[in-house]
Image (cartoon, rainbow, N blue to C red):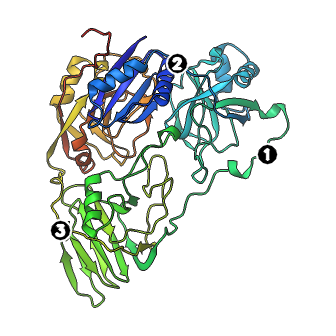
C-alpha cells in the first residue's frame, strides 16, 4: 500500500494514504488497537492527523506503530441508520444534471438510492463528509464558491455528499435542502451524524409529509446564564472596544463532531492571569483585544490582567484615580471603575477574577469559537457578569510575562516545522517563505493572521483533498499569500500547509499586531518519515 508520514510539528504527524478507504481502514485499526501516547486521530479524505505525547511516544515508535497497523481492510459500517428527508430544490440541480449528462430526476434517483457512510467531519461543526454514493454522481466543486449557503443545504462535491449545518460560505453543488438540524448545542452528541453512521436520503416529494420533531429543530443561541457557585460579587460592563470574549483552554477532543479546540489565543497569558488570582489554569477569563474595556465593580473582588500590557486605571467611588500594575493582583472595592487603555505592544489581554466568572459552559468549555459560533455570547455594554465565591487557596501577587510583547514596528522571528506540504511548492517559493519579511495585514482575527509578501508559487497545482489542520498551520491559498491559523482555525482545509509553527511560539503568534512583520525560521529540513520497508 502507499503510505507517507509527514511532519507537522513535534507532537503531530500527517499520515497520507492512497485513498479514503485506506485512510479509514487505518483509522479503524488505530481505534481497535490503540497506541499508548496517541492523543487524537482526525481522519480526512486520504489522510490521518495524529496528535501524540512526545514524552510517551517517540517519533520512531509512532512510525513503527502506524506502519504495523496499516494495510488492513475497512470495517463494515455499523453505526446508526439515519434517514435525511430532502426537498430536491437546490440551485445547482439543473447544472449538476447537465454536467453528468442526465436528467434532474435521474440525479435525485441515484442520490436517494445510494447507501452513504459518515466518513469524517470537517469544515464546520456537524458538517460530515458522506462517502459511498453512486460513482456517477462525482461532480467538481463550484468554480466560484458562494458567499452564503443556507443551513440544511444538501450538496455534492467530488465523491462526497454532505449537508451544511449552518449558513456559511461554501463551494459544493447544491441539489436540495433538509429540515433536519445537523448540529445542536443542547443535543448529546451535538452533531446528528457521527463517523460510521449509515445515511439514506429520502425525497420528501415522493411520500408522506415529514414532521420535524422538537429534537431536530435548531436550538437557540445559548445565553450567558450563571454557572454554579455564583457569589454576590459581579462586574458591570460600561464600555468595550473590540469584542470582549470569554475564553479558557478550549474544548479539545471533539474533532469527531467537527469541533476545533478553540480557547485562548495566548494560553500562557490566560494561565498567568488565573495563577495570579489563585484560579485553576482552565478557569474562564475575558480575552480583551486592544484594550478599551471599562467596567464597574459590584461588591469586592481581586483581579489580575496578563498578556498585552495596557494601562489600568482604577477610579474609586469618591473620584480618586490610581494607576494599577500589570501582571499583579489588584483588590477592588464596591463601586470601583476599572478602565483599560490601548496596549503599546501585543494584541490581547486576559482579565481574571479570583473565584472565576460564573458562566455556564457550552460543550464543556466557556470558550467562544468565533468561526464555529459556539460558546457564550460576546459581552456588550450593560452586561453584568457574576463572580464565583473563591475557595481557600494560594495565589501569587505578581509574576513576569512569559515573553516580551511584540509591537507593530518590529519584525518577529517565529520558528516553524517544515511540512506537511512543503513539497507542493517550488524550491524558490520555499526559499522566499523563509527569507522574506511578511507583513501582518488588517484582515486578521482569531481565525488566523493574513500575511502579505512575495507570493509563493506552487509546484503541484492539483486540488488537495480536505485534510486536518492545527493551530499554527501556515496555509497557502491560490493567491500565494499565507494565512497563519490561530485558535479558531477550521478543523480541515483544502489548501496546502507549507509549514507549522513550533509549539513554543504558538502563544507569541497570537500577540503579533497588525503592521508588524514576521520572519520564519525553519527548525528542520522537510522530509517524510521513513516507514519500515521503505528505503531512504
Q: Point out the tag, 1 or 2, that comes first from the N-terminus.
A: 2
Q: Is residue 505 above or below residue 68?
A: below
Q: Which residue is mark 2?
A: 21
Horizontally, residue 512 falls left or right of residue 176, namely: left
Where disc 1 sits, the SS reads loop
Question: Which is nearer the eye, 173 or 467?
Answer: 467
- Name the residue rendered at 26%, 57% in the picture: 269
Q: Is residue 402 above or below residue 260?
A: below
Viewport quadrant of the C terminus:
top left
The circle drawn on residue 211 is 1
Q: Which residue is mark 3?
A: 398
Give the percent coordinates (x, y) of residue 277: 28, 69
Q: Point out the tag, 3 or 2, that comes first from the N-terminus.
A: 2
Where disc 2 sits, the SS reads helix
**Separation (CA) of disc 1 from disc 2:** 36 Å
The circle drawn on residue 460 is none
Give the percent coordinates (x, y) of residue 333: 31, 84
Disc 2: CA contacts within 10 A as few (<14), some (14-19) or many (>=20): some
Horizontally, residue 386 falls left or right of residue 471, namely: right
Horizontally, residue 217 falls left or right of residue 449, namely: right
**Which of the 4 image quarters holds residue 95?**
top right
Give the percent coordinates (x, y) of residue 439: 22, 40
Question: Which is nearer the eye, 25 or 483?
Answer: 25
Q: Point out the tag, 1 or 3, that comes first from the N-terminus.
A: 1
**Separation (CA) of disc 3 from disc 2:** 54 Å
Which of discs 1 and 2 lies nearer the camera? The answer is: 2
Viewport quadrant of the N terminus:
top left
Viewer can see residue 409 = yes
Disc 3: CA contacts within 10 A as few (<14), some (14-19) or many (>=20): some
**Which of the 4 image quarters holds residue 58?**
top left
Amino acid at each position: 500500500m502507499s503510505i507517507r508520514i509527514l511532519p507537522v510539528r513535534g507532537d503531530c504527524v500527517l499520515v497520507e494514504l492512497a485513498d479514503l478507504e485506506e485512510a479509514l481502514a487505518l483509522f479503524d485499526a488505530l481505534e481497535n488497537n490503540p497506541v499508548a501516547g496517541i492523543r487524537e486521530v482526525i481522519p480526512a479524505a486520504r489522510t490521518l492527523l495524529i496528535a501524540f505525547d512526545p514524552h510517551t511516544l517517540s517519533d520512531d515508535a509512532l512510525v513503527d506503530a502506524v506502519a504495523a497497523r496499516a494495510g488492513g481492510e475497512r470495517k463494515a459500517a455499523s453505526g446508526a441508520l439515519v434517514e435525511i428527508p430532502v426537498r430536491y430544490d437546490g440551485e445547482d440541480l439543473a447544472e449538476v444534471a447537465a454536467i453528468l449528462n442526465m436528467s434532474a430526476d435521474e440525479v435525485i434517483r441515484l442520490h436517494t438510492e445510494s447507501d452513504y457512510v459518515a466518513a469524517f467531519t470537517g469544515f464546520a461543526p456537524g458538517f460530515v463528509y458522506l462517502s459511498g454514493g453512486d460513482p456517477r454522481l462525482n461532480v467538481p466543486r463550484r468554480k466560484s464558491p458562494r458567499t452564503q449557503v443556507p443551513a440544511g443545504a444538501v450538496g455534492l462535491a467530488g465523491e462526497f455528499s454532505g449537508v451544511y449545518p449552518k449558513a456559511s460560505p461554501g463551494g459544493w453543488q447544491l441539489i436540495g435542502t433538509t429540515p433536519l438540524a445537523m448540529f445542536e448545542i443542547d443535543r448529546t452528541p451535538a452533531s446528528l451524524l457521527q463517523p460510521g453512521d449509515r445515511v439514506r436520503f429520502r425525497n420528501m416529494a415522493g411520500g408522506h409529509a415529514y414532521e420535524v420533531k422538537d429534537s431536530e429543530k435548531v436550538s437557540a443561541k445559548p445565553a450567558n446564564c450563571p454557572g454554579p457557585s455564583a457569589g454576590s460579587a459581579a462586574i458591570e460592563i460600561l464600555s468595550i472596544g473590540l469584542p470582549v470574549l470569554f475564553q479558557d483552554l478550549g474544548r479539545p477532543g471533539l474533532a469527531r463532531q467537527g469541533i476545533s479546540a478553540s480557547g485562548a489565543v495566548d494560553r500562557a497569558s490566560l494561565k498567568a492571569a488565573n495563577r495570579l488570582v489563585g484560579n485553576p489554569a482552565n478557569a474562564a477569563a475575558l480575552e480583551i483585544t486592544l484594550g478599551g474595556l471599562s467596567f464597574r465593580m459590584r461588591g469586592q473582588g481581586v483581579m489580575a490582567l496578563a498578556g498585552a500590557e495596557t494601562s489600568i486605571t482604577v477610579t474609586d467611588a469618591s473620584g480618586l484615580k490610581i494607576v494599577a500594575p500589570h501582571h499583579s493582583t489588584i483588590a477592588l472595592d464596591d463601586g470601583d471603575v476599572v478602565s483599560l487603555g490601548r496596549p503599546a505592544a501585543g494584541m490581547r489581554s486576559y482579565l481574571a477574577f479570583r473565584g472565576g466568572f460564573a458562566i455556564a459552559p457550552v460543550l464543556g468549555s466557556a470558550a467562544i469559537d468565533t468561526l464555529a459560533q459556539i460558546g457564550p455570547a460576546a459581552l456588550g455594554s450593560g452586561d453584568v457578569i457574576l463572580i464565583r465565591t473563591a475557595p481557600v487557596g494560594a495565589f501569587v501577587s505578581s509574576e513576569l510575562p512569559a515573553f516580551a510583547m511584540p509591537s507593530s514596528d518590529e519584525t518577529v522571528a517565529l520558528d516553524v516545522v517544515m511540512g506537511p506540504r512543503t513539497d507542493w511548492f517550488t524550491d524558490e517559493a520555499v526559499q522566499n517563505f523563509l527569507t522574506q519579511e511578511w507583513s501582518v495585514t488588517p484582515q486578521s482575527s482569531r481565525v488566523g493572521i493574513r500575511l502579505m509578501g512575495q507570493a509563493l508559487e506552487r509546484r503541484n497545482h492539483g486540488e488537495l483533498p480536505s485534510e486536518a489542520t492545527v493551530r499554527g498551520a501556515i496555509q497557502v491559498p491560490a493567491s500565494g499569500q499565507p494565512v497563519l491559523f490561530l485558535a479558531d482555525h477550521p478543523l480541515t482545509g483544502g489548501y496546502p500547509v507549507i509549514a507549522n509553527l513550533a509549539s513554543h511560539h504558538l502563544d507569541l503568534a497570537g500577540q503579533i499586531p497588525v503592521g508588524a512583520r514576521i520572519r520564519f525560521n525553519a527548525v528542520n529540513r522537510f522530509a517524510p518519515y521513513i516507514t519500515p520497508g521503505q528505503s531512504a
